[in-house]
Image: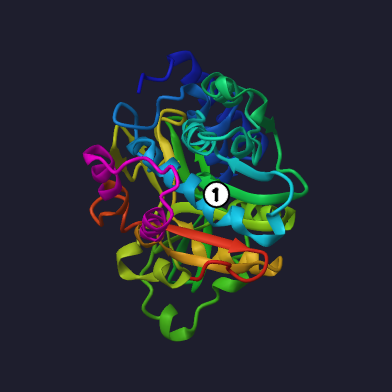
Amino acid sequence: MSAMAPEASQVLEERIRTAITAAGGTISFAQYMAMALYEPKVGYYEQTPRVVGRGGDFATSVSVGSLFGELIAHWIEKEVGALETLASGPLEIVEAGAHDGRWAEDILSALTQGSDLNRERFRYRIVEPSATRQTWQRERLARFGDRVVWSETLPTEVRGVIVSNELLDAFPVERWRWRTSQRRWVEQGVGWTGQGFDWTALPTPAPVEWELPEEVQSVLPEGFVRERSPAAVAWWEQAAMALREGCLITFDYGLEAEEFLTPGRSAGTLRAYRQHRVSDDLLSSPGEVDLTAHVDFSAIAEAGLRQGLVTWHRERQSRFLMRILESTQRNPGGFPEWNTPRVRAFQTLTHPEHFGRGFRVLVQGRGRCPWGA
């Protein structure tokens, strides 16, 4: 990835410092993270589409090649598209967190092969609040014409599938540290020392659901770090409210609630990424590094359940993609031939040393899962 322009970095730092001053000397880490990643024109995700892949700062399932999109396209067509409630009218595919539009391109390329009737079966919408990223996406997807539409917010009603890949981990998170002497969680904010950004304590009350039994409090070490993302939970709940028929699906790296309190997570899961190298220095070089934390899949799933959804799949990405692989063998129907490069790509998507262990999938829908769990 090309380095951030010095003037952009200076503008972003100054904006964050101004926000800190306006707030009385401290802002929440969630606000810092939101500005570092999404501040218009100067935030990390506003700089260039080339942050993903071998030449960028991190890799995703999409950067492995077109196979990931082709597998999801097959799943949408053969499984979601087979739902009786979606038998009439076009099936809507709504993607959030599309970045430069590559996953959309892979999915659409697979779905629009074949007859004109098949092409008319699907409508693709990208939810993108950033004018900069919309420009990247429109350039990449121009050949699909009016089959792709854009909106800045989620539609109020969706009949089909809402998809996302590594979206939830990019929502701003709160960062909390355990204080043994007070037996409570203290939220960490960000201040300015005159030399750089640094951590400061906020007086925020701890989440009620984080109250710990005495036996856990007595052994939890000083400074144990935990994160949460109310924004990610709120987004999933909003998507669940919009869903009238069909399902929500997300791929991401994450944990169940109880896994966040294991000894190996004492420093939390927040990390900074730059040129495929991970760092725990979260407050240096805002706008020049990716900031990300593991998704709390327990909290996300509960948000969907509150809106009446049923959990269809909650498992590792490797297992879910194996299900689709088996489906392609039962219903080949135009699925591309499994040549050597494609087999290697599948191994990358599913092998424990690559995307198979840490990445998980959550699928929640209206009614019973139609193809078995």
Residue 141 lies in the magenta-colored region: no
Q: Nearer the viewer, residue 298 or 141?
A: 141
Label total for image: 1
Q: Secondary structure at mark 1?
A: helix
Where is residue 245 shown, x and y percent of the image?
71, 58
Tell me where residue 172 appears, x and y as whole percent.
55, 46
Main secondary structure along the magenta-highlighted residues: helix
Label 1 is placed on what type of residue? Glu
Quarter of the picture holding the N terminus: top left
Q: Which residues are magenta?
A: 321-347
Q: Could you tell me if residue 173 is visible in this image?
A: no
Q: Residue at x 43, y 71 (%)?
A: 180
CA neighbours of label 1 inside 10 A, class few (<14), some (14 to 19), many (20+): some
Q: As drawn, is 222 to the left or to the right of 308?
A: left
Say if 83 sits above or below 131 in the image. Answer: below
- Is the residue 5 above or below the residue 268 in the image? above
Residue 246, position in %: x, y? 65, 57
Q: Residue placed at 66% from the left, 51% from the top? A: 160
Residue found at x 39% / y 55%? 321
**Above or below: residue 10 compared with residue 201:** above
Report the colour scheme. Answer: rainbow
At 30% from the left and 47% from the top, the residue drawn is 346
Q: Does residue 184 lie above or below 235 as drawn?
A: below
Report if residue 218 is visible in the image: yes
Find the residue positioned furthest to the right. 156
Please tell me in which quadrant of the rendered image residue 53 appears: top left
Q: Would you name the residue on which mark 1 appears? A: 77
Q: Position of residue 146 (x, y in %)?
A: 67, 25
Q: Residue 346 in magenta? A: yes
In the image, 88 versus 244, the foreground residue is: 88
Residue 18 in the figure: left or right of residue 270: right
